[in-house]
């Protein structure tokens, strides 16, 4: 955008590394200069990661967190996609149901915790339920929006070739809405990952979110806290990048032509 | 104003077609007493400025809009809805971007057995000149190629009628000239009845057997001009220019810029 | 007789604002309200028939709200939560938007910082709780910090994205007319990104409202999030819990609608070419 010369290829690696290096240095020296006894230095965090790996906790916790996210997310997709498609297909039904969704949506999953515990008790089901709730709304809303954004011309062409409603939905509306549905799924996955952390701080005893709270509570192990945070960030990023790869599938790639 | 009687079999007959759109309490009459007959195998062009009801008329013919008055009959039956026997060809925006060239052409053929489907796909790909691009997606094609694909998709179901709504509007003028020739070539092979809507008077005179000139809103057909020049048409011949100028005058437009 | 064609006449007529139209719009509210009423009745029915004595029905919830009003707590808690959200949100906006516009404008800055942002973004604000407590202690400042965090990264990314999406023709036109770099930023970039920024602000405000509930878990003693956690811990007052949820939902909706009407204001609507 600015009028400076076009960056070269090597710069794509150079600048991020520089920024990361500066950040690490800043971090390290602010720990040293403030002589804090509690906040970990980068090295301490690295040792913390090694410790967790050595005890086998790291992979176990990652597995637990991923499992809960997978269950909640899939449940949300299985319920949400058909629901969203239906609401999008029948705008009159959507007009009626949408206000309810808009009222429920701003209620943080955390606010549902007491109700969730009441319904599912303390255990695996509660975090999965919270993740399910959090992922449901973006999925439903993106399906509705995907269906209503299908250009009328596609439906027309479909009807012209003799398709009736079920055929139209399956062969025209769904493929046309798919890019937008995928975006909704990716956003929902990101939200699910965020909520997982929150859900695991309560009522479970494994997982990355649990690790964050537990490391502090049982001994002020801030090196493990930061280690957990970093892991959360990296895996969340990996999930997002992995999902973005789906955009390259040729039968949806047309829908993403505007994105960089 | 009734069309002149045609000696061939009448395919389509529109009588006293009125179309009024009502929105939020205000009504807009768009079509006012349109009458036209189209013969089987004929190439009819409908000309008029953009947005004045030509597309509405075509939609009524195709069964996508019900006229508020009058009726349209095809083969003697009143038109009640869309039908694969009369396929719309849009300005390439109607192509399904998630399907390949083959996939798009195959779209309407779901009632046919596999062997028949494959042979038709191959035939029409060759006919419109898209051989070699079977697995390409519409996003990878040029404007002219996309238009050919739309025509191929429409022809594959072997419709009686083709309804084209300014199909070459998005193309550059050189491609447009080429595409007109292609369309005529295909039409001579397939011999469907064609109704072609355009705002380009030259295009109408170059392609059509007859040209229906529409008036402004509320529109009706001012005049139907028979183009009695044999194909291939010489676009500098006196007869061509005479017919073209006649239509220009009919629309109240000057000959000089 | 030839008819002179006037294509100007062929434009779409504007929407009318007469009485019929307005009544038509109002009528559109009847069915959703009826549906909500139906759900409330079904909920009440399920609760009175069900075996769980703890989960409250809508009547009990209303009783809970009345309770809060009687103790003067309703307004106090709403204000407390809004206060924290506002502080965190505004701080985040004031920092993230200029920074994001800068990063989006300079390719190298974006290359440098994007990977870091992408790593920080998936980290839930709640994961920062231990660090928040370490730095800010227990109390309001911590929760404001968490809300700040939850708004900072989305707004940063929105600003970066908004700048990158400016069609280069606008920038080129600006330069063509002799604008300096600062001139281009002020007279081209800023108006061009405004619609997208407002949408981003609206969405992020919604996020902030969701996070405030979680942020108030950290030993503050007021606010709607606190209400929910405390009501359960100090006596299983599930009617207050659900009352809190209902109020959170309604206020969140109001905030969202408020921001939407800002989005719709004429001067920002250049972005939408169709009515």
Image (tube, coloured by chain):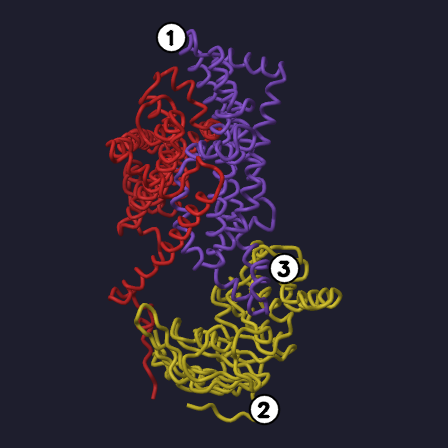
Q: Chain of mark 1?
A: A
The label on residue B101 is 3
Q: Is residue C256 above or below residue C238?
A: below
Q: From the viewer's side, name the closer residue of A203 and B233.
A: A203
- First of labels 2, 3 by sequence position: 2
Q: Check if mark 2 and mark 3 are on a common chain.
A: yes
Q: CA distance from mark 2 to mark 3?
A: 36 Å
- In this view, A109 is above or below B10: above
Is residue B38 toward the left or the right of residue A28 in the image?
right
Chain A colour as displayed: purple
Label 1, label 2: how far apart the Cα atoms are: 98 Å
Residue picked out by circle 2: B8
Is residue A49 something that shows in the picture?
yes
Q: What secondary structure is found at the residue carrying circle 2?
A: loop
Residue C111 position, x and y percent, is 46, 30
Q: Nearer the viewer, mark 1 or mark 2?
A: 1
Q: How busy is the neighbourhood of tag 3: few (under 14 within 10 Å), some, or many (20 plus)?
A: many
Q: Residue A34's mark?
A: 1
Element marked by disc 1: helix
Residue B249's spot in the image, x, y percent? 37, 83
What chain letter is assigned to the residue under label 3? Answer: B
Q: Is label 1 on the same chain as label 3?
A: no
Q: Is residue C146 above or below residue B199?
A: above
Nearest to the eye among marks 1 and 3: give it: 1
Q: Decide which of A96, B46 is in the foreground and name it.
A: A96
How far apart, in angstroms, are the residues tagged by discs 1 and 3? 66 Å
How far across and down, in percent of the image, does residue A191 sit?
48, 36
User: Which label is found at residue C234?
Assistant: none
Q: Tell me if label 2 and label 3 are in contact, CB under 8 Å.
A: no
| Residue located 62% across and 61% down the image | B104
């Amino acid at each position: 955008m600015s009028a400076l010369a076009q960056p070269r290829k090597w710069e794509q690696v150079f600048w991020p590394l520089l920024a990361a290096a500066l950040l690490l240095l800043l971090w390290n020296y602010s720990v040293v200069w403030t002589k804090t006894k509690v906040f970990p230095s980068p090295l301490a965090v690295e040792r913390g990661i090694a410790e967790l790996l050595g005890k086998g906790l790291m992979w176990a916790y990652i597995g637990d967190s991923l499992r809960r996210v997978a269950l909640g997310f899939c449940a949300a997709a299985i319920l949400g996609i058909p629901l969203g498609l239906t609401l999008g297909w029948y705008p009159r039904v959507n007009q009626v149901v949408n206000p309810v969704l808009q009222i429920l949506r701003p209620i943080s999953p955390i606010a549902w915790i007491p109700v969730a515990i009441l319904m599912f008790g303390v255990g695996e089901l509660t975090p999965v339920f919270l993740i399910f709730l959090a992922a449901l709304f973006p999925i439903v809303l993106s399906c509705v929006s995907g269906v209503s954004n299908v250009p009328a011309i596609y439906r027309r062409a479909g009807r012209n070739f003799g398709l009736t409603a079920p055929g139209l939905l399956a062969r025209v509306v769904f493929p046309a809405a798919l890019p937008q549905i995928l975006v909704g799924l990716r956003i929902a996955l990101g939200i699910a990952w965020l909520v997982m952390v929150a859900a695991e701080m309560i009522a479970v005893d494994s997982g990355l979110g649990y690790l964050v709270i537990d490391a502090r509570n049982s001994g002020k192990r801030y090196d493990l806290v930061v280690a957990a945070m970093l892991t959360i960030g990296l895996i969340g990023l990996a999930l997002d990048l992995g999902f973005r790869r789906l955009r390259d599938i040729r039968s949806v790639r047309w829908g993403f032509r505007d994105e960089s | 104003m009734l069309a002149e009687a045609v000696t061939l079999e009448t395919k389509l007959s529109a009588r006293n077609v009125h179309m009024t759109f009502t929105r939020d309490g205000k009504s807009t009459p768009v079509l006012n007493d349109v009458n036209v007959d189209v013969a089987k195998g004929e190439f009819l062009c409908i000309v008029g400025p953009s947005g004045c009801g030509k597309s509405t008329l075509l939609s009524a013919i195709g069964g996508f809009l019900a006229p508020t008055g009058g009726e349209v009959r095809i083969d003697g039956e009143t038109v009640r809805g869309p039908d694969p026997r009369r396929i719309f060809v849009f300005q390439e925006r109607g192509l399904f971007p998630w399907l390949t060239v083959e996939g798009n052409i195959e779209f309407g053929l779901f009632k046919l057995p596999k062997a028949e489907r494959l042979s038709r796909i191959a035939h029409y790909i060759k006919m419109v000149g898209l051989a070699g691009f079977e697995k390409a997606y519409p996003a990878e094609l040029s404007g002219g190629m996309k238009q050919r694909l739309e025509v191929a998709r429409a022809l594959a179901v072997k419709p009686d009628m083709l309804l084209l709504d300014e199909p070459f509007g998005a193309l550059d003028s050189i491609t447009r000239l080429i595409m007109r020739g292609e369309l005529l070539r295909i039409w001579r092979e397939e011999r469907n009845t064609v109704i072609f809507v355009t705002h380009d008077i030259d295009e109408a005179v170059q392609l059509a057997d007859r040209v229906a000139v529409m008036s402004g809103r509320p529109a009706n057909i001012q005049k139907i001009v028979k183009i009695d020049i044999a194909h291939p048409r010489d676009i500098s011949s006196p007869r061509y220019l005479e017919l073209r100028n006649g239509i220009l005058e009919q629309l109240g437009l000057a000959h000089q810029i | 007789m030839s008819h002179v064609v006037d294509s100007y006449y062929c434009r779409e007529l504007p929407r009318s604002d007469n009485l019929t139209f307005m009544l038509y719009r109002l009528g559109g509210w009847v069915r959703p309200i009826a549906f909500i009423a139906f759900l409330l009745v079904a909920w009440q029915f399920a609760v009175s028939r069900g075996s769980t004595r703890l989960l409250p029905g809508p009547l009990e919830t209303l009783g809970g709200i009345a309770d809060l009003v009687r103790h003067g707590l309703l307004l106090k808690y709403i204000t407390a939560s809004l206060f924290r959200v506002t502080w965190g949100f505004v701080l985040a906006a004031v920092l993230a938007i200029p920074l994001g516009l800068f990063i989006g404008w300079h390719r190298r800055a974006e290359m440098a910082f994007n990977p870091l942002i992408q790593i920080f973004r998936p980290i839930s604000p709640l994961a920062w709780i231990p660090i928040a407590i370490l730095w800010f202690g227990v109390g309001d400042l911590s929760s404001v910090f968490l809300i700040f965090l939850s708004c900072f990264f989305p707004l940063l990314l929105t600003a970066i994205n908004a700048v990158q999406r400016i069609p280069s023709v606008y920038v080129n036109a600006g330069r063509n007319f002799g604008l300096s770099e600062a001139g281009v930023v002020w007279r081209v970039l800023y108006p061009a990104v405004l619609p997208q920024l407002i949408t981003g602000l609206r969405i992020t405000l919604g996020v902030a409202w969701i996070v405030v509930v979680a942020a108030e878990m950290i030993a503050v003693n007021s606010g709607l999030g606190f209400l929910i956690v405390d009501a359960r811990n100090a006596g299983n007052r599930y009617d207050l819990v659900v009352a809190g949820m209902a109020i959170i939902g309604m206020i969140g909706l109001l905030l969202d609608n408020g921001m939407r009407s800002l989005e719709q204001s004429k001067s920002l609507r250049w972005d939408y070419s169709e009515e």
